[in-house]
Image: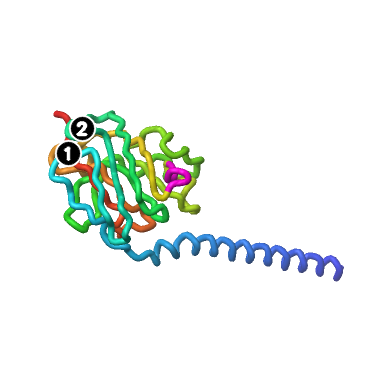
Amino acid sequence: MAEGTEKRRRRRRALLIVLLCAAVLLLGAVAAILVPILSHHSAGGSGQTLPAGFVSEASATGADGRTRTEGGPADLAKITAGDVLIVRGTGFDPKIGIYVSICAVPEPGQKPGPCLGGVPEGAMQEHEPAAPGTAEPQSSVWITDDWAWRSFATQGYDEGSDGDFTARLLVADPAQQNLDCAEVACAVTTRADHTAVNDRVQDMLLPVAFSR
């Protein structure tokens, strides 16, 4: 009887130890994800001056010393819902994920937005990200190499590059719940993802207009 009781106690202790170890591992994983977000410091602005007209490419040297280039189709003055824009970037910081979408042009120094397209497709569940430049066109593209978020993103930065990417951006309807690009100035925009939401160093804009 006593021997059976002791065995049950040992099993309970072993189970408790396993549960404690699992809890420690879980807390460690959560900390590894949250601490970089909470402790991230803005690198400053991207250095871009918004182009006066419709251009197919823009470059700027940011406060971090990186020269970023964002390029798109030749004619952004007459885009239409359903178009697929091939957006290319070079020189972006691969340690900071970005969203690529069409957003309202912000006041200088402010975050671009609101944006067409909403949350990137697939961002709410884990999946195998597409190879760079091969993802199905989406109205909001999420690019990151962060180990914690890569399996939720649309794709990563180009392999073997230093912050280059090719995104296939599906042009959404210009009038949505919180934005009408027929009424306000909009642009094909890159901006830091939620892990560095207040960092403006990855912000690049190419003005667009929708065909009427």
| Residue 5 picture location, percent across and down | 81, 68
Colouring scheme, one of rainbow, by chain, secondary structure, one colour = rainbow
**Of 70 and 84, which appears nearest the observer?**
70
Instruction: From the viewer's perspective, tell me whether residue 8 is left or right of residue 109.
Output: right
Q: Earlier in the sequence, mark 2 or mark 1?
A: 1
Residue interval drawn in magenta = 155-161
Q: Say above or below: 110 vs 167.
A: below
Q: Which residue corresponds to mark 2?
A: 75
**Of 94 and 154, which appears nearest the observer?**
94
Instruction: From the viewer's perspective, tell me whether residue 140 is left or right of residue 15.
Output: left
Identify which residue is drawn at 29% across, 44% down.
70
Q: Which residue corresponds to mark 1?
A: 54
Residue 76: image quadrant is top left
Element marked by disc 2: loop
| Residue 208 picture location, percent across and down | 19, 38
| Residue 59 picture location, percent across and down | 25, 48
How packed is label 2: few (under 14 Cα within 10 Å), some, or many (20 or more)?
few
Residue 55: image quadrant is top left
Q: Say above or below: 101 vs 6.
A: above
The answer for how far apart the CA atoms under marks 2 and 1 are is 7 Å
Residue type for callout 1: Phe
Identify which residue is drawn at 54% across, 64% down.
28
Magenta-colored segment: predominant secondary structure: loop
